[in-house]
């Protein structure tokens, strides 16, 4: 019975770390979105010297947290006791000016990519790293 209790506790601890990391990634995404809506670049914790990398499926790959280009921003969760800190990063992409074929139509930065932004965010907590991506269509993201 004790072994079973310990296993369940370990599973719960891992789920809580996973959920906290996911909540951090969502917070980073929302912070980037708010920055874009206020005419900022939407980049959080990643150096502007970093060159975006894409995989074979045309997906942006964020740099790892231990990269020289990352200075993760600590996000403090105040409603926990003791307060927890989640490291977050985020990169926003304006599809119309990134010199990349984001929509896969064979043409980079064409009219079909105008007004489309993607936000790529990640968070690290308790050994867990979670990533999220969101794509927004807006002809005036400042509204």
Image (tube, rainbow, N blue to C red):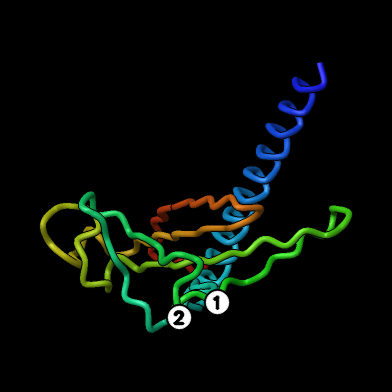
Instruction: Return the x and y of residue 80 as percentages of the image width and height.
Output: 84, 53
| Residue 95 located left or right of residue 123 | left
Q: Residue furthest top?
A: 1
Q: Residue furthest right?
A: 81
Give the residue displayed 53% in from the left and 72% down from the top.
44
Give the residue displayed 44% in from the left and 60% down from the top.
119
User: Label for residue 71?
Assistant: 1
Q: Which residue lies furthest to the left in this view?
A: 106
**Residue 52 position (above or below residue 23):** below
Task: From the viewer's side, name the closer residue of 143 and 119.
Answer: 119
| Residue 102 located left or right of residue 25 | left
For label 2, the residue is 47
Task: From the viewer's side, name the closer residue of 139 and 34.
Answer: 34
The answer to which quarter of the image holds residue 6 is top right
Instruction: Return the x and y of residue 88 as percentages of the image width and height.
Output: 59, 64
Density class for disc 2 (Cα within 10 Å; few <14, some 14-19, many ≥20) is some
Instruction: Return the x and y of residue 93 as percentages of the image width and height.
Output: 37, 67
Density class for disc 1 (Cα within 10 Å; few <14, some 14-19, many ≥20) is some
**Residue 118 position (above or below residue 48):** above
**Residue 49 position (above or below residue 21):** below
Instruction: Return the x and y of residue 122 as percentages of the image width and height.
Output: 52, 58
Label tally: 2
| Quadrant of the rendering where the N terminus is positioned | top right
User: Marks 2 and 1: in contact by CB < 8 Å?
Assistant: yes
Give the residue displayed 49% in from the left and 74% down from the top.
70
Q: Which of marks 1 and 2 is nearer the N terminus?
A: 2
| Residue 75 located left or right of residue 123 | right
Task: From the viewer's side, name the closer residue of 78 and 29.
Answer: 78
Instruction: State the CA–CA distance, disc 1 to disc 2.
Output: 8 Å
């Amino acid at each position: 019975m004790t072994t079973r209790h310990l296993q369940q506790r370990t599973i719960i601890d891992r789920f809580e770390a996973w959920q906290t990391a996911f909540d951090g990634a969502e917070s980073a995404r929302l912070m980037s979105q708010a920055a874009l809506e206020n005419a900022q670049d939407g980049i959080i914790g990643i150096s502007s010297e970093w060159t975006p990398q894409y995989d074979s499926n045309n997906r942006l790959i964020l740099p790892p947290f231990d990269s020289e280009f990352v200075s993760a921003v600590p996000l403090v969760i105040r409603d926990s006791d003791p307060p927890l800190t989640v490291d977050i990063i985020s990169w926003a992409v304006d599809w119309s000016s990134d010199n990349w074929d984001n929509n896969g139509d064979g043409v980079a930065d064409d009219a079909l990519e105008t007004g489309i932004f993607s936000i790529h965010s990640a968070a690290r907590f308790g050994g867990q790293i979670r990533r999220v991506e969101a794509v927004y269509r807006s002809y005036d993201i400042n509204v």
